[in-house]
Image (cartoon, coloured by chain):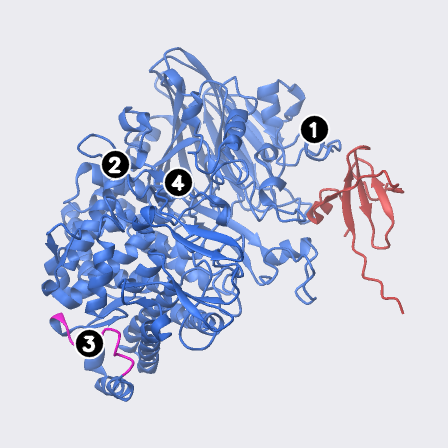
Amino acid sequence: MVVVGKRVVALYVDRVAQQWIVRDIDGNYWSLPINDHPWEERRPFHPTEETELEPVPGHYKYVLGLPW
Amino acid sequence: MTAEHDRLDAARDQQVPWKKWGPYLSERQWGTVREDYSDGGNAWDYFSHDQARSRAYRWGEDGLAGISDDHQLLCFALALWNGKDPILKERLFGLTNSESNHGEDVKEYYFYLDSTPTHSYMKYLYKYPQRAFPYANLVDTSKQRSRSEFEYELLDTGVFAENRYFDVFVEYAKASPEDILIQIQVWNRGPETAELHVLPTLWFRNFWSWQGSSERPLLQEVAGDQTQSIIKVRDREFEQFYLSCEGSPPLLFTENETNTQRIFGVPNRSPYVKDGINNYVVQGQQGAVNPNKTGTKAAAHYHLTVAPAGSGVVRLRLAKAAPSVGTEGNGSRSAWFGSSFEEIMKTRRQEADTFYTALTPTSLTADQANVMRQALAGMLWSKQFYHYDVDRWLEERGSDPFKPIRKQAPRNEHWHHMYNGDVISMPDKWEYPWYAAWDLAFHVLALTLVDPDFGKQQLKLMLRERYMHPNGQIPAYEWNFGDVNPPVHAWSTIFTYYLERAHTGEGDKEWLKSCFQKLLLNFTWWVNRKDRNGRNVFEGGFLGLDNIGVFDRSAPLPTGGYLEQADGTAWMALYCENMLEIAMELAMSDPEYVDMSLKFYEHFLWIASAMTHMGGENGMWDEEDGFFYDVLRLPDGSAFRLKVRSMVGLLPLCAATCFSGQFIKKYPEMGERAQRFLAARPEIRQAIHDPAKPGSANRHLASILDETKLRRVLSKMLDENEFLSEFGIRSLSRYHADHPYVFCAGGQEYRVNYLPAESDTGMFGGNSNWRGPIWMPVNALIIRALLQYHGYFGDDFQIECPTGSGRMMNLFEVAREIGRRLGNIFLRGSDGRRPVYGGTECFQHDPHWRDCILFYEYFHGDNGAGLGASHQTGWTGVIARIMHVFGTIDSEQVLTGGKGAYFQASARAEQRTAEQIGG
């Protein structure tokens, strides 16, 4: 049996596209709009090999209005 | 007593919150471990000075000449702009560890001129250049310099040429615990009229962003009049709080929120961010401040034009009460800033003078009194709200206390239990804006001169469950809480107890007991962790002495094997003596502690005798040299001494404590048990001082060194060609200037030279040096020990000081001579120069510089010039206690009163002053 480590939510910034990116607990990536309800209005994001995601500390989740 | 003593009493006895507001704002929050969320733990690069103006902090705040409440919810500090700098001067600038040739270093001139212990009065001076601040020049030039060159200082850049700078004096005076008067006086020292923007700034620490709280505090403009502008504070904690700004300056509002555009490249959700006021004033961005005049950060904008040799004054009042309306005189001045403001300011200044007059020995000269007062002012200004929830910080980095350690564990992963959120005495609020446990024990020696309650609270704090590790270890410092510092906490504890007992007539035994219980855990941690073979010989790693050894003593040795450390073992002998003193004191009123007394007595003897016995020919004591050394034990069983003549070998001398016969008188059976223990083990006292042998006034002495060894070590310590400099005891013998110690292992050469100034290696960050310079804390320990020896040996023990001079002294006189030399670092000599300032001419001659004293981290071994951190009033502030000791007692008093002599004389002097002031 293959044991898969528990996924954790992670925050990133994509400086080229000037947007926040979230990887949710299932491993899906989302881009967040700059507004008061970013999580509700998130959009799927599909990183490519060229995408450079810079990690953002977890405590920014409240700044970004994330629900966890 | 004095009005300030009354406030201290009220704070202690009636919980009047005189200490609620104080200089608790750090001078640097960026570049700290707390703010570091990088993968590699590079705190300096992760959160830089350049980011600080734009990025909200997670754990604390910083500012210039600032204050905050004791939970650091609301902060006040100064921002300045000379019209030429690229940014507001909101915080002190300095180089990071990798930018400077000798480690991190603040590149500003600022001085803690005065403070009372309740902060009822405080004064600070900042020197702000009128030319553009040479940020890039400082970085670029310093990077090019080698470790063998001096640091590049702000004065070296020429930015102060022609005295084109402002002296900005900031004074705080409390009308009541929550009514703070603020006066900022700006002097133009230059030859031409100059303009300065002064922006007193009020803001909330950002505590709402990190907790998902929908509730956030608010600052807003409320109606003032032509005489004042007013900011109202709206928050649960600070209901009805106001900052009134005289002269109705415009008020600027923004939010203490990260400028995500600048830091992360992502547009901001709100246009009002942390650097909004900066961008409005410096760059003219009109939209950067909130026109609705609300926010979590606000500043009053004063624009001063100051004539040469002239000054301008800005006055504010931060108070719980609503500002009084109405005017005085011709109606141009608010009553809130009228004659009563001036009267309160003047009264608090006078009360500060009276307070310091009362505690300064009358035998001190005016210059000595000034040095002592500034040392204490620096210590009081170095109090900082230190906030660090380690569990949460680790959790935010993915660490879990119940999971196995990952390959790259974050820093301090074993300290999940820690929650720090207290006002703590810092070593240096810019260079070391985090507590260091062994530093703190020394801080207390000086702080108790002005505020014994604070000293007691600080000692207890480190032993609380939120600090001390469950295994008994006292946290070292945030870079590595698990590092090992010398165990001096018990010494500071018993010192503080004796002091209070003499002053109040009764010691706080409950406090002493509670400290003792926790210290027992810590003592046991040492015994079980640092005595590799269970033979009472201790290791400990660097033990606070950074680069003093041949190798990095905290790293695996290049030879394999391990070190038996003379200092580690001596520290533990001293720890035993201190615990013995505490246990005996407690036993005088509680027989439960009698057995503990005997336990520590015996434990001391085991350690002391191990130090002189263990290893035989390869033990720590070198009979030929008459000195103690570390012993290197190699994997093949061989061993030899690392013959570096350093403070490591002087520390055994410091493990000496003189005891009166009171305890044995009360418990004679304990004396018999001690005698039986010694009689059954004659080898124990063979090579150490015989504790059974009575001395002066029938006292007894616990000491590793017997009289013969003591004389031999002293002859080296007091030799000006070895340890004794004109400015105190060096950390390494000057002997090694001509005779470097060289050791070869693994094809590499390790060398220890006498280096009287800065370090020439990167060991321990490269920003401190124990290979020659003079360090105040270990000098204080030496002085303590000499007074103990004098209490035992009396006048019969005479020794040549300096060695070879033909001048004979008793050990009190030797101690006083060392104290005098230490004081000379700061005092103006017959040539008018203060050695601490070396060749920096403006500090030697300019009336606007020369009496502002900086208390550096350590001092040049030959000329006394200040080195390392420039504001480490922390343990260097101990000079105040040293001056006080020798201004209070003489040799005869020590002989008559024993070790209690100083405490009693100090209490009597205080009583005399009280009577004089009272009547």
Q: Secondary structure at mark 2?
A: helix
Identified at 70% across, 46% down, the residue is A57
Nearer to us: label 2 or label 4:
4
Q: Earlier in the sequence, mark 2 or mark 4?
A: 2
Instruction: Give residue B237's position: percent from left, percent from top.
Output: 54, 46
Identified at 65% across, 24% down, the residue is B288
Asked whether residue B910 is in view, the answer is no
Q: Are marks 3 and 2 in contact (CB under 8 Å)?
A: no
The residue that label 4 is drawn on is B871
Q: Earlier in the sequence, mark 3 or mark 2?
A: 2
Q: Residues within 10 Å of mark 3 (few under 14, many from 20)?
A: few
- The disc labelled 4 sits on which kind of residue? His
The residue that label 1 is drawn on is B271
Q: Earlier in the sequence, mark 3 or mark 4?
A: 3
Asked whether B470 or B509 is in front, the reply is B470
Q: Colour of chain B?
A: blue
Labels 3 and 4 within one chain = yes
Labels 3 and 1 within one chain = yes
